[in-house]
Image (tube, rainbow, N blue to C red):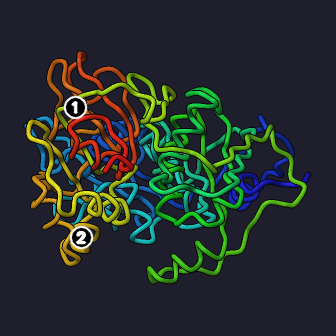
Amino acid sequence: MKQNLTYKILQRHTSDKITEPGQIVQCKVDMVLANDITGPLAIRSFEGMGAKKVFDKDKIALVMDHFTPQKDIDSANQVRISRKFAEEQNLTHYYEGGDSGVEHTLLPELGLANPGDLIVGADSHTCTYGGIGAFATGMGSTDIAAAMALGETWLKVPQVIRVIYDGELADFVSAKDLMLTLIGIIGVDGALYQGLEFTGPVIDRLPIEGRLTMANMAIEAGAKTGIFPIDDLLRQWRAEEGLSADLYLEADKDAVYARDVEIDATGLEPVVACPHIPSNVKKISSLPPTEIQQVVIGSCTNGRYSDLEAAAKVFKGRKVKKGVRCIVLPSTPKVWKKALKNGLIEIFMEAGCIVGPATCGPCLGGHMGILGDAERAVATTNRNFKGRMGSLDSEIYLASPVSAAASAVLGRVASPAEL
């Protein structure tokens, strides 16, 4: 059987011969991830099943990122449970406070997620690591507890959809627009329990941080994974980050896919996902004037340095419109320090933004930017379900960093082309 990239990565981690989709295979894992919300659930399951020691103290990561700093007693106790477990198990990779950050930016940055890896996490956006050519997927906390104890898990071999992006990107069109466009075409269940493999000339040129943005939202199309090529662009990025860059792995030329989805990127405009579902995608230019009260720039989708840099170019010499609160959350301490060193933080503050810590913050309705009744937000996050960021009567529009910044300046859902 000719294998796509998804199957080749799985085959590296199982002794079972992969022959067809739907097959159940037992796989060894390279990294097991949990956070301050899901970690305590996994820890309780780990203890409940009678496990005493994790399979490898170097291959478990607990990242306290959803409530940083902790907003109340309950969230502080979640961290306390995680910290205690990390100490008891002598875990190498426990991150809290000033050395923490949004997990899905932090792990690739630290070299804990690598090309060709198989990574499971108690967080649905674990699929982010597909941006660097890993098979990475979210699981429930009970499955994560078993993986922490055994170092392996079972997986159903998914069918794989190949997504081909042709053409040239226009000004202000980014990776976020590419992914929202795909979700708008196939829907939030268009790749249900299937893999996505991204290819084509546009992908060949797309920076790695943009690939991570797109892979992050594979789950918003229902996908199990969203995997990008392990190519020279990735190897160059890894080398620049001081990480190993010697893996060569690609799909067989006549590999079988469930179907192809072809998208001509030429002529695409900046888009937003309108309330209350990520597939409700519309061109910004087609919307009526839509006033907003909040903008959020950050999250595991778009809180990386290149995202902040793009937003800062829009904000430079401009002001956030009065009546709008614009919250900027760099996704790791490294991103924060680089943004500070290069003057981005000053640009944001001069524009009237609120710059916060490396945290998930308001993305999940956690803290640092909860929406009130009838309030609207433009956010670079990944979900806009009813009540996701606060009040059930609020609305969220998902957009790229440059569109979010333009919206903050104009006080309405807006494209940077308007500036």
User: Going 49% across and 52% down the picture, which residue do you hit?
Assistant: 173
Lower sequence index among marks 2 and 1? 1
Q: Which residue lies under the disc numbered 1?
A: 292
Q: Is residue 170 left or right of residue 332?
A: right
| Viewer-closest of 134 and 162 | 162
Instruction: Nearest to the eye among marks 2 and 1: give it.
Output: 1
| Viewer-closest of 116 and 350 | 350
Q: Which amino acid does label 2 sit on?
A: Ala
The location of residue 57, given as percent across then percent down, is: 40, 64
Instruction: Say if residue 192 shows up in the picture.
Output: no
User: Going 82% across and 49% down the picture, which residue do you hit?
Assistant: 18
Q: Is residue 305 above or below residue 405?
A: below
Number of other residues with Cα within 10 Å of mark 1, as a class: few under 14, some 14 to 19, many 20 or more:
many
The location of residue 165, given as percent across then percent down, is: 68, 51
Q: In this view, does 29 lie to the left or right of 304?
A: right
The location of residue 417, given as percent across then percent down, is: 39, 49
The location of residue 67, given as percent across then percent down, is: 19, 45
